[in-house]
Image (cartoon, rainbow, N blue to C red):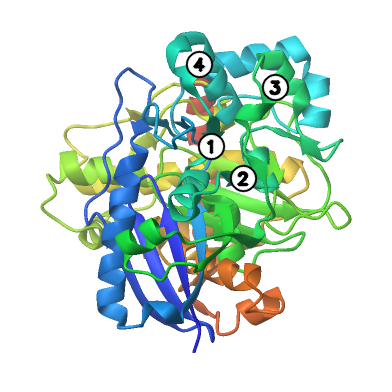
């Protein structure tokens, strides 16, 4: 039996999963057991050191192999999923030059906004489908402007998944989908976006070689194999950003299909065949993992930075880490819908794309000292996250995205029955939960890239929904009213 190994490099942890080629989950492991720290040297900044990721990849692999009792030579391919939009800089020796600037870092938002207006909205939207915004290319420009000594030493600028692939294979590469998430893909020319590199004055040589998403991308080096306890020569055959990969893991591949996730950030990802864009770039369009110029597949992505991180903040600060997330969900469910007038706006994790890259921070409205207790805060948090996602979903719907059915992994916020019910009722979507995750998706992707699976349908044998949540018709009118109230307060805060 052949086995497939998938890594999911997140901002909270590194997860590893081992699948048998017949689709059975053999084992999984996570490192660290508590969430990885995100460093914020200045307000709005968010950094992690790539070497920390590599240490936890090693730890997760050791735990996985101890559980699985599978011989390393039976593992035929490795796939990588990774936190999107980050920036990792290395010199010619492959040494990291500074901590990674990760996805929720806001420092480059003004740079991207200036480029958007200097190049012109029509040019950016027609060629890049997005504003340069707070994405990887703009983060690289920030380093050029603010850390010129480091910039001069750069050999290659990579995404987090490209860094992990380099540690595994020694090769420095990226993918078309990866370039698109950095706003470095020209959709008209179907190649690297020279127009933005020229505007920023960035040398093309800093951008890695481009390889297909599903393909042999290198072999495990002896040093990496020794560090991981794996066999040298094992193929690395897939890499993708966490949200396209999450959609792939749920078999969301074709126009009209929608995936969601609610981890540290919350994402709704709809697949289309046309190069659609939002004129204010509040939701973003990227190449999906199965995109081909002759058969286009594009992912329209809504991202809410403040999702599970809000729940984690409440657990640590309100609950003092004394109770579990499951117990928090139970407390929230004891409070009536609407949390008796308490509203939470979960915007405390940097600049939010759906708010045109504004940083308004999180806020609590309507707090009554004589009425509300911690259960109210917990329910208002879950409702506020759903309301914020729905605010972005309305933008996607105006772009033609249909959200009658949403697939998600049975993980993170979707482990809460209350969250599932509120999400389904507010959005009007049927929610199907699957027992899969990003690491399993990366393993399946590796099987495709290595040719172990002849086609995607073979890769998803055995994938079945575990739970279905329908909109609650009794609560729908109330939630329509509650959402309208919440949106009015947000609109006033934004000065609209």
Label of residue 197 in the image: 3
Label of residue 457 in the image: none
- State the separation of the CA atoms marked 4 and 2: 21 Å
Image quadrant in which you'd find residue 447: bottom right
Left or right: 407 as drawn, with respect to 90: right
Q: Cβ–Cβ below 8 Å for labels 4 and 2?
A: no
Residue shown at 37% from the left, 40% from the top = 50
Quick one: quadrant of the C terminus? top right
- For residue 274, above or below residue 193: below
User: Which residue lies under the disc numbered 2?
Assistant: 174
* Circle 1: element type: strand
- For residue 439, above or below residue 452: above
Q: Quick one: 118 or 269, which is closer to the camera? A: 118
Q: Residue furthest right?
A: 294
* Circle 2: element type: strand
Badge 1 crowding class, 10 Å Cα cut-off, few under 14, some 14 to 19, many 20 or more, is many
- State the separation of the CA atoms marked 4 and 1: 16 Å
- State the separation of the CA atoms marked 3 and 1: 15 Å
């Amino acid at each position: 039996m052949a086995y497939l190994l998938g890594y999911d490099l997140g901002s909270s942890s590194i997860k590893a999963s081992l699948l048998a080629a017949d689709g059975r989950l053999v084992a999984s492991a996570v490192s660290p057991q508590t969430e990885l720290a995100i460093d914020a040297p200045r307000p709005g900044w968010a950094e992690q050191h790539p070497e920390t990721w590599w240490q936890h990849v090693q730890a997760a692999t050791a735990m996985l192999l101890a559980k699985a009792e599978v011989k390393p030579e039976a593992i035929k391919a490795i796939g990588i999923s990774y936190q999107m939009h980050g920036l990792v800089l290395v010199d010619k020796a492959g040494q990291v030059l500074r901590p990674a600037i990760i996805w929720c870092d806001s420092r480059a938002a003004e740079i991207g906004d200036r480029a958007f207006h200097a190049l012109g909205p029509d040019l950016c939207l027609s060629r890049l489908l997005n504003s340069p915004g707070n994405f990887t290319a703009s983060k690289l420009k920030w380093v050029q402007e603010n850390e010129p000594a480091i910039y001069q030493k750069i050999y290659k600028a990579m995404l987090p998944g490209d860094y992990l692939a380099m540690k595994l294979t020694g090769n420095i590469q990226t993918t078309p989908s990866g370039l698109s998430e950095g706003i470095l893909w020209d959709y008209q020319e179907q190649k690297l976006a020279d127009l933005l590199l020229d505007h920023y004055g960035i040398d093309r040589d800093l951008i890695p070689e481009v390889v297909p998403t599903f393909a042999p991308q290198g072999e495990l080096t002896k040093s990496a194999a020794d560090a991981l306890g794996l066999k040298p020569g094992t193929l690395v055959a897939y890499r993708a950003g966490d949200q396209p990969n999450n959609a792939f893991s749920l078999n969301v591949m074709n126009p009209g299909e929608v995936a969601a996730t609610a981890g540290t950030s919350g994402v709704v990802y709809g697949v289309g065949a046309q190069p659609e864009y939002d004129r204010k770039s509040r939701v973003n369009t990227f190449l999906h993992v199965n995109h081909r110029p002759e058969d286009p597949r594009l992912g329209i992505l809504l991202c809410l930075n403040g999702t599970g991180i809000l729940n984690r903040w409440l657990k640590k600060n309100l609950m003092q880490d004394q109770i579990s997330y499951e117990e928090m969900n139970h407390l929230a469910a004891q409070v009536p819908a609407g949390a008796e007038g308490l509203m939470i706006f979960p915007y405390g994790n940097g600049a939010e794309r759906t708010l045109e890259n504004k940083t308004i921070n999180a806020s609590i409205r309507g707090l009554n000292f004589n009425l509300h207790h911690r259960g109210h805060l917990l329910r208002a948090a879950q409702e506020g996250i759903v309301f914020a996602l729905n605010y972005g979903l309305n933008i996607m719907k105006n772009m033609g995205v249909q959200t009658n059915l949403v697939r998600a992994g049975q993980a993170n916020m979707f482990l809460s029955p209350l969250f599932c019910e509120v999400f389904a009722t507010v959005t009007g979507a049927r929610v199907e939960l699957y027992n899969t995750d990003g690491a399993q998706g990366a393993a399946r992707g590796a099987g495709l890239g290595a040719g172990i699976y002849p086609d995607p349908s073979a890769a998803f044998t055995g994938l079945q929904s575990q739970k279905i949540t329908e909109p609650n018709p009794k609560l729908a009118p109330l939630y329509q009213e509650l959402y309208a109230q919440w949106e009015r307060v947000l609109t006033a805060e934004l000065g609209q």
